[in-house]
Image (spheres, rainbow, N blue to C red):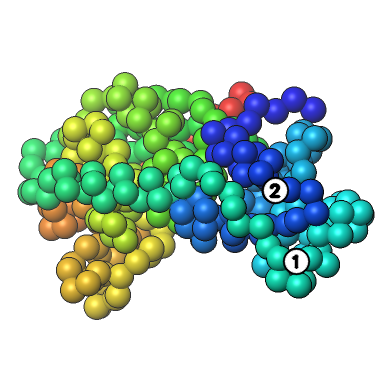
Amino acid sequence: MHMTLTAFQRILRDAVERIPWGEVTTFKVIAEALGDPRAALAVKNELLKISRVERDLPWWRVVSSSLEPLPGAEERLREEGSLLRARAGRIFTDLEIWPVFSVMASDQVRLSDRVILEELRDVSVAAGVDVSYRGEEAVACCVTVDESMRILETRFERFVPQVPYVPTYLAFRELRGMLPAAMRCSFDVIFVDGHGLMHPRGFGEASHLGLLLGRPSVGVAKSRLVGDLRGDRILLAGREVGIIVRGGYLSPGHMSDLGSAVKAAERFWREGNQPFPLKMAHSLSKRFRPSD
């Protein structure tokens, strides 16, 4: 079975290769070495994929925090006596791998200082961008519409995400497709199926995309990532970072503020919990799958 490893899978492979014979580590230990313990589930899922093609990789030496092995790993662990050592408290931690999530988080903090929050004006053409998945491949779709909701442009970009989904790092997974699709469109504002300012580091996917494009952006997500509800408003550390609009969670991304972002979204909203161009991008990206 042929599979080209993603950037994240190559980092994971390097980590597993460091585990000595007779020892084990855990998904959480690897995730912590990568910079975020929330990545433990992603580590497990990606390791399962690698184990199907990297036959010489000692993938069986990575277990859960409760020492539950991966399917098919029990016999090899018995041969090495690894679990007996692990139950005695011996867990290998000397991984020395690139802390990719720490680097991503630092980049988000650094780039958040460049976000401009200002009134969004003169909006007559709006774009929506979204990503759909099938297996290891994905397709991004960017759709632009005018004020009559007439579709002006539709652009697609096929790509292979290089990192798995881990909360707060979605941009690093999806911008590989979103950015080139959006760059081929003309618009006054772009709506993103993700967060903007409503993010633990104030720099969600909508902010990231808007900054790279140098264009106004607004995030309209389906769920709340951070913050406290005060009526229909979302506050983070006492700061108003988002608002619930028609069931969607809206926050300014770049070159927009909350008030003008809401006004712009309402102008391009028909029904449901997202503006029309964003709903169209979602629908078309699902139809135009990578296998087409």
Instruction: Find numbered disc 2 in the image and state the secondary structure of the residue it sits on.
Output: loop
Name the residue rendered at 19%, 35% in the picture. Answer: 215
Mark 2 vs 1, N-terminal side: 2
For disc 1, the marked residue is 86
Question: Looking at the picture, how far across and down is residue 95, in whole percent?
Answer: 59, 49
Task: Choose between 233 and 266: the one closer to the eye.
Answer: 233
Amino acid bearing label 2: Ile
Q: Residues within 10 Å of mark 1 (few under 14, many from 20)?
A: some
Task: Choose between 140 and 96: the one closer to the eye.
Answer: 96
- Quarter of image, res 200: bottom left
Left-right relation of 283 to 134: left
**One can see residue 247 in this view:** no
**One can see residue 205 in this view:** yes
Name the residue rendered at 22%, 38% in the picture. Answer: 211
Question: Looking at the picture, how far across and down is residue 271, in whole percent?
Answer: 36, 54
Question: Looking at the picture, how far across and down is residue 229, in whole percent?
Answer: 29, 75
Left-right relation of 194 to 264: right
Q: Residues within 10 Å of mark 2 (few under 14, many from 20)?
A: many
Name the residue rendered at 70%, 48% in the picture. Answer: 19
Name the residue rendered at 54%, 34% in the picture. Answer: 7
Whole-Å distance between the Cαs marked 2 and 1? 13 Å
- Quarter of image, res 216: top left
Amino acid bearing label 1: Ala
Viewport quadrant of the C terminus: top right
Task: Choose between 206 and 124: the one closer to the eye.
Answer: 206
Instruction: Find numbered disc 1 in the image and state the secondary structure of the residue it sits on.
Output: helix
CB atoms of marks 2 and 1 within 8 Å:
no
For disc 2, the marked residue is 19
Left-right relation of 266 to 35: left
Question: Looking at the picture, how far across and down is residue 24, in whole percent?
Answer: 73, 57
